[in-house]
Image: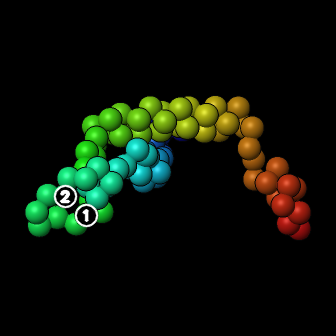
Amino acid sequence: MSLTTAIAIYFIIWWTVLFAVLPWGVRSQAESGTVAPGTDPGAPAIPKVWLKLAWTTIASAVIFVLCAIAYNYRLVTIEGLVRLLGIT
């Protein structure tokens, strides 16, 4: 796998994981009891964006390493997937 391909795959994994991590621990302003004037009551009270970016980076790195190991050691192949899905 070339460096450019690895970076592109990591970026796709990171972006996907970000959307999975964003809702973690979110409390709306309505739930916390302090709604700022002019904002939606469902808006996050304390979004903790930097913490979520850190968790996204850690989770993405783990997923990327597992994918790289599967690719480098040929643990998942097209022939294996065809056999598993029963496609003829």
Q: Residues within 10 Å of mark 2 (few under 14, many from 20)?
A: some
Percent coordinates x, y for residue 6 in the rendering: 47, 40
- Asked which secondary structure carries label 2, the reply is loop
86 or 53: nearer the eye?
53
Please say if 16 is above or below 73. below
Mark 1–mark 2 contact, CB under 8 Å? yes
Q: Position of residue 66 (x, y in %)?
A: 61, 34
Q: Residue at x 89, y 63 (%)?
A: 86
Disc 1/disc 2 C-alpha distance (Å) = 6 Å
Q: Quadrant of the C terminus?
A: bottom right
Neighbourhood count class around disc 1 (C-alpha, 10 Å): few under 14, some 14–19, many 20 upward: some
Residue type at the position of mark 1: Pro
> Is the N terminus in the top left, top right, bottom left or bottom right quadrant?
top right
Residue drawn at x 82%, y 50% is 80
* Residue drawn at the location 30% of the way across and 63% of the way down: 42
Q: Amino acid at mark 2?
A: Val
Colour approach in the figure: rainbow
Q: Is residue 52 visible?
A: yes
Task: Look at mark 1 in the image and give the residue it sits on.
Answer: 41
Q: Quadrant of residue 48?
A: top left
In the image, residue 30 above or below residue 66: below
Q: Which mark is residue 35?
A: 2
Q: Taking the image as drawn, is residue 68 in sight?
A: no
| Left or right: residue 35 compared with residue 22 | left
- The residue most toward the front is 33
The answer to which of marks 1 and 2 sits earlier in the sequence is 2
